[in-house]
Amino acid sequence: TSIRYYIAVDANGISNLMCQVDGGTPEPLVSGIEMIKFLYGVDTDFNNSANYYLTASEVELANAWNSVVSIRIGVISSSAEFTIPSARRLSGSPATINVLNGSYTPADNSRAYYASTATVSLRNLSYQ
């Protein structure tokens, strides 16, 4: 089974986290997801704690998938179809939002934006 997650903008201009299983019809999972980023914690001293975090490409290049012990997930979400009334909006250009070494600059300032991160330990692993 192949499961693909990605972000797509719908006809109303709303970003959605999408899911597609085995090349089938994509389905929206969550609206208002502007950016999602993953970093993989690599354990180099075999104590089940990450010594550093890498992107998937960097883990692949280092051939270190067997040493991944945690995942950091960064998400930037918006208020989607709910906008801030014009009297309460900030003037000027929207600020850049940073999460897990990634940055996102909103196209406008009519929505509320929120950045969050979480780290998940992969506890049921055994080194191969």
Image (tube, rainbow, N blue to C red):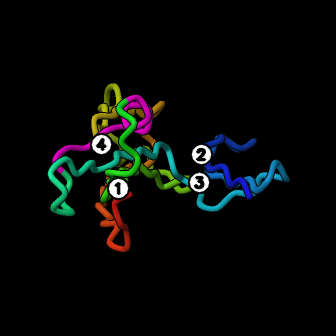
Query: Which class describes the residues within 10 Å of circle 4: few (<14), some (14-19), or many (20+)?
Result: some
Q: From the viewer's perspective, is the residue at label 4 or at label 3 nearer?
A: 4
Q: Amino acid at mark 4?
A: Val
Q: Mark 1 or mark 2, which is nearer the start of the sequence?
A: 2
* Cα gap from disc 4 to disc 3, whole angstroms: 23 Å
Where does label 2 land, which residue? 15
Query: Which class describes the residues within 10 Å of circle 1: few (<14), some (14-19), or many (20+)?
Result: many
Residue lying at the far top in this picture: please name it: 93
Q: Residue at x 51, y 51 (%)?
A: 33
* Cα gap from disc 1 to disc 3, whole angstroms: 30 Å
Query: Which range of residues does the magenta coloring cover?
Result: 51-61
Give coordinates of residue 10: x percent, y percent: 71, 44
Where does label 3 land, which residue? 81
Label 2's element? strand
Q: Residue at x 82, y 48 (%)?
A: 23
* Cα gap from disc 4 to disc 2, whole angstroms: 17 Å
